[in-house]
């Protein structure tokens, strides 16, 4: 990734370092409910502070329509302080006198969190004047919000394009970029991809892009039902997108033309409805009844998927196999996840996974920490898999202008 500057080369001592982080974390009763994203960015924050930088955190939280106390970053700043084990000051605005005064009061090594950037409508509009106001608060810019890098907002892209600030990817951002490069630019072949989730409609671009990159495409979740229907298989009352059956046939035809392997369920766990403690049975995919709902892959499908992964060198995973949120329909995803973790540990597979549902499913399976790289980014990870260059990444690639 030679097109990016390295934080190793950044001179931050005594400098005001604007760090765009993603503190858009789940909140419950005014407290942070899941601090995963904060833990990911903590090493960059502490490194910059330890080097004598004046660390200024920029972030959004939720989608407020102007200043709103319930969307204030103040309680999130307190959680950052707890995790980095040092004080984090807070400014009541991200631009204007309050932000300027808070920044001016900083000493080397201090950390300051500015208020929610989305309290200003100009943030999401990528307003040039607003971006210049943000940039004026710093001497250096560090992008550490991969999960927001698919947004062309003022604190992500405008802050670079409308200023002369030297811009660097943070440690977590660089890890994401390196993982994506290893998965797609310089992967070890054969490459397999698991694409699951409820709907094809949200992943048409992804499926089309992956066919040109992988040797095996494994399709699971509700979206597999549409492919099964395209093959004339019975799917009972299962979730399907009837209007996209033609699209599914087109993807299958493209895969055949490119000599790509498409892996679909050969058996399934079915039930009368999606609910806990309903009676379930495993049936051959050709034996799904009219009243059956496909809710997970069966053991023969798990065996087939694991066999494909065992002969692969690289895996990209986005989306679960079944309705993993409700037991026992997490069994298929759990079994594949455990196999992926074991192959990764044995150094037989390089495994990359990402997306909200995927991370949740891997956490349920207890293997998230055993894969090569797991991205907590949602839309940004998906758009990267689709082959798109993210706006927040593009501005880092053109620094030698």
Image (cartoon, grey):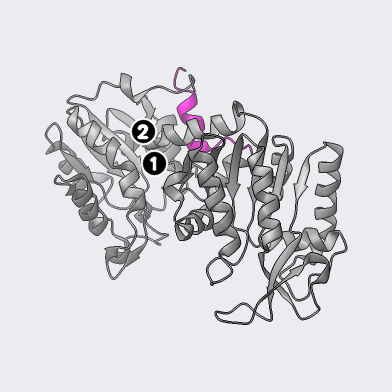
Is residue 328 found inside the magenta-colored segment of the image?
no
Magenta part of the chain: 387-401
Give how far across and how far down residue 13 sits, in percent. Answer: 19, 24
- In the picture of the structure, the residue carrying the numbered disc 2 is 171
| Residue 4, label in figure | none
Q: Is residue 234 left or right of residue 7?
A: right
Instruction: Give whichever of 158, 354 is nearer the camera.
Output: 354
Q: In the image, what residue occupies the spot 60% across and 29% down?
A: 187
Q: Report helix, strand or loop for mark 1.
A: helix
Neighbour tally class for label 1: few under 14, some 14-19, many 20 plus, Cα within 10 Å: many
Q: Report helix, strand or loop for mark 2.
A: helix
Whether residue 380 is visible = no
Q: In the image, what residue occupies the spot 69% across and 34% down?
A: 213
Question: Height in image: 359 above or below 145?
Answer: below
- In the picture of the structure, the residue carrying the numbered disc 1 is 155
- Tell me which numbered mark, 1 or 2, is placed earlier along the sequence: 1
Question: Height in image: 312 above or below 284?
Answer: above
Do the residues bearing badges 1 and 2 touch, measured as CB atoms within 8 Å? no
Q: In the image, what residue occupies the spot 60% across and 82% down?
A: 278
Q: In the image, what residue occupies the spot 75% across and 55% down?
A: 264
Q: Nearer the viewer, mark 1 or mark 2?
A: 2
Disc 1 from disc 2: Cα separation: 18 Å
Instruction: Give whichever of 78, 161 is nearer the camera.
Output: 78
Whether residue 370 is visible = yes
Q: Is residue 28 left or right of residue 183?
A: left
């Amino acid at each position: 990734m030679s097109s990016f500057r390295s934080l190793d080369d950044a001179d931050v001592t005594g400098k005001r370092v604007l760090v765009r982080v993603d503190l858009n974390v789940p909140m419950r009763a005014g407290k942070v409910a899941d601090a995963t994203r904060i833990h990911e960015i903590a090493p960059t924050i502490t490194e910059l502070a330890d080097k004598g930088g004046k660390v200024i955190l920029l972030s959004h939280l939720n989608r407020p329509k102007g200043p709103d106390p319930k969307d204030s970053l103040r309680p999130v700043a307190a959680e950052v302080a707890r995790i980095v084990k040092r004080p984090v000051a807070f400014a009541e605005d991200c631009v204007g006198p309050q932000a300027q005064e808070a920044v001016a009061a900083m000493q080397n090594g201090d950390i300051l969190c500015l208020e929610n950037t989305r309290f200003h409508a100009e943030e999401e509009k990528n307003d040039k004047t607003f971006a210049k106001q943000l940039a004026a608060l710093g001497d250096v810019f560090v992008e550490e919000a991969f999960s927001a890098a698919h947004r062309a907002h003022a604190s992500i892209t405008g802050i670079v394009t409308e200023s002369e600030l030297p811009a660097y990817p943070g440690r977590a951002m660089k890890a994401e970029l390196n993982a994506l490069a290893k998965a797609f630019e310089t992967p070890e072949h054969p490459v397999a991809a698991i694409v699951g989730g409820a709907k094809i409609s949200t992943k048409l671009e992804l499926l089309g892009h992956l066919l040109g990159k992988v040797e095996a495409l494994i399709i699971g979740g509700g979206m597999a039902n549409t492919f099964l229907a395209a093959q004339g298989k019975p799917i009972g009352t299962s979730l399907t997108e009837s209007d996209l059956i033609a699209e599914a046939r087109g993807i299958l035809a493209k895969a055949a033309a490119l000599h790509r392997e498409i892996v679909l369920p050969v058996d399934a766990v079915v039930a009368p409805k999606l609910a806990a403690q309903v009676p379930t049975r495993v049936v051959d995919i050709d034996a799904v009844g009219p009243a059956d709902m496909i809710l997970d892959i069966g053991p023969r499908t798990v065996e087939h998927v694991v066999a494909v992964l065992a002969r692969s060198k690289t895996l990209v995973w986005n989306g679960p196999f079944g309705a993993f949120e409700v037991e026992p329909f997490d069994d298929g995803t759990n079994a594949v996840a455990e196999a992926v973790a074991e192959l990764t540990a044995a150094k037989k597979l390089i495994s990359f996974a990402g997306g909200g549902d995927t991370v949740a499913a891997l956490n349920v399976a207890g293997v998230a920490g055993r894969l090569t790289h797991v991205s907590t980014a949602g839309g940004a990870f998906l758009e990267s898999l689709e082959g798109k260059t993210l706006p927040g990444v593009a501005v880092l690639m053109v620094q030698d202008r």
